[in-house]
Amino acid sequence: MRNLPVFLLCLVCVVVYGLVVPRLFKRGEKSRPTLVKRLFIYLFWGVIFSALWHSYFYPSAPACQMAGIALGLGSLALFRWAYRQHGRHMPGRAFTPDVPAAIVTSGPYARVRHPIYAAYLLFMLGLVVGTQSALAAVLWLLLGVMYHHAASQEDALLAASAHADLYLRYMQQSGRLLPWNVWRRRQV
């Protein structure tokens, strides 16, 4: 095996983000997955299996492997930090119309409205960097579009909810997936 660290990172991704994490979120209503949800799932697993394939058969530079590992570990830390900010309230799943009971604005949410999505994308970026796979990069970009769509949908849902006043102020002071205003003083 040529990229053992990245291969192990892929396996961690399968276990953590594919099997464990879905159990941590509120289940929406029982319905058939929409085309968008199915595409989202296919892209997620496509990045992972592309990275697994590539890490097994093609060598990548050791520096890229280590950078991929660092991004993957950073992603797990960001996910854990963001998830813990919810306290006893489980966050909802992507592409569900559930409005949360409260708006979380502490921890990583202070600068990014959707840090859990950002953590997923960071992990997948680690796989792309670690394997140096063009296919994984294309799938990661498509997954990024999907997460951006999910985040936009949630922003619109919350901006039209009972939390609208707070959420609109919060949107002005935080980035959707990136912390664009790190040095700015928060008002929320």
Image: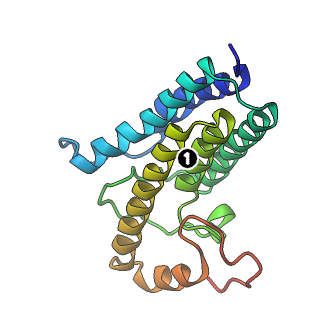
Q: Position of residue 173 (x, y in %)?
A: 60, 82
Q: Report the side of 58 relative to 46 (left or right).
A: right
> At 28% from the left edge and 41% from the top edge, which residue is drawn?
38
Q: Amino acid at mark 1?
A: Tyr
> At 71% from the left edge and 30% from the top edge, which residue is drawn?
60
Q: Nearer the viewer, residue 122 or 130?
A: 130
Q: Which residue is mark 1?
A: 120
Count residues near mark 1 (Cα–Cα under 10 Å), then give few for <14, some for 14-19, many for 20+. many
Q: Taking the image as drawn, is residue 84 in sight? A: yes
Q: Position of residue 66 (x, y in %)?
A: 79, 35
Up the image or down, 82 lies above or below 160; here it is above
The quarter of the image holding the N terminus is: top right
> At 57% from the left edge and 42% from the top edge, which residue is drawn?
124
Up the image or down, 87 lies above or below 185; here it is above
Q: Residue furthest top?
A: 1
Q: Position of residue 55 (x, y in %)?
A: 62, 24
